[in-house]
Amino acid sequence: MSTAYVSGRVAARYERLVARQARAAKTSKSDLVARYVVEKSLETEFPGISFRDSLSGREAYLTGHRVAVWEVLAVREETKSAEKTADHFRWPRILVTRALAYAKAFPEEIRGSREGETNTAPAAG
C-alpha cells in the first residue's frame, strides 16, 4: 500500500497522552496518530460508522451498537433487502444504509474482517 505524509502539531499535554496510548497499544506514536487520522476521517465521511479492536484487528461497526459492518452485510445478503435487514436488527433503515455504503466503499476491508471473525469466506454472489 502506498502512503503519504501528513503532519500536524498538538499541545504537549496531548502529545503525552498519545505517547501513553501508543505504549499501551504497543505501537509507535506515528502509527497511532495515522490510525486516528484515518479513522476520524472515515467516521466523518460515513456518519454512524466507528472502529473497534476485534479478533481480525480494527474493524468498522455501527456507532452505539455491537454489530460490525460485515454482520449487517451478511444479513443483507440473506434477506436480499435493506428494509428486512433493518427489521432484523430493529433499527431505522438509515443505519443499514450507512453500513452498506461503507461496505461498498471498502469491500476488501469488510471481507477481511468477516473472514477474520468467522474464519470462513463469504458466499459468492
Image (cartoon, rainbow, N blue to C red):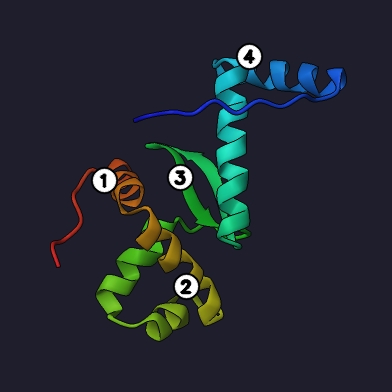
Tell me if 118 is positioned left or right of 15 in this view. left
- Asked which quadrant contains residue 55, the reply is top left
Q: Which residue is mark 2?
A: 96
SS under mark 1 = helix
- The kind of residue tagged 2 is Val
Residue at image x 46%, y 79%?
86
Q: Which residue is mark 3?
A: 59
Q: Looking at the picture, how far across and down is residue 11, in whole percent?
A: 86, 23
- The kind of residue tagged 1 is Glu
Instruction: State yes or no: discs 2 and 3 in contact (Cβ < 8 Å).
Output: no
Q: Which residue is mark 1?
A: 115
Label 2 crowding class (10 Å Cα cut-off): few <14, some 14-19, many 20+?
many
Tell me the distance, in whole angstroms, between the alpha carbons under discs 4 and 3: 21 Å
Tell me the distance, in whole angstroms, between the alpha carbons under discs 1 and 3: 12 Å
Q: Quadrant of the C terminus?
A: bottom left
Q: Quadrant of the N terminus?
A: top left
Instruction: State yes or no: discs 1 and 3 in contact (Cβ < 8 Å).
Output: no
- The kind of residue tagged 3 is Glu
Q: Which residue is mark 4?
A: 23
Residue at image x 56%, y 80%?
92
Tell me the distance, in whole angstroms, between the alpha carbons under discs 1 and 2: 20 Å
Q: If you read the primary sequence from the N terminus, does the residue marked by circle 4 or circle 3 appear first?
A: 4
Q: Looking at the picture, how far across and down is residue 65, in whole percent?
A: 57, 60
Instruction: State yes or no: discs 4 and 1 in contact (Cβ < 8 Å).
Output: no
Tell me the distance, in whole angstroms, between the alpha carbons under discs 4 and 1: 29 Å
Q: Looking at the picture, how far across and down is residue 80, in whole percent?
A: 27, 80
SS under mark 2 = helix
SS under mark 3 = strand
The vertical placement of 27 against 119, above or below, is above
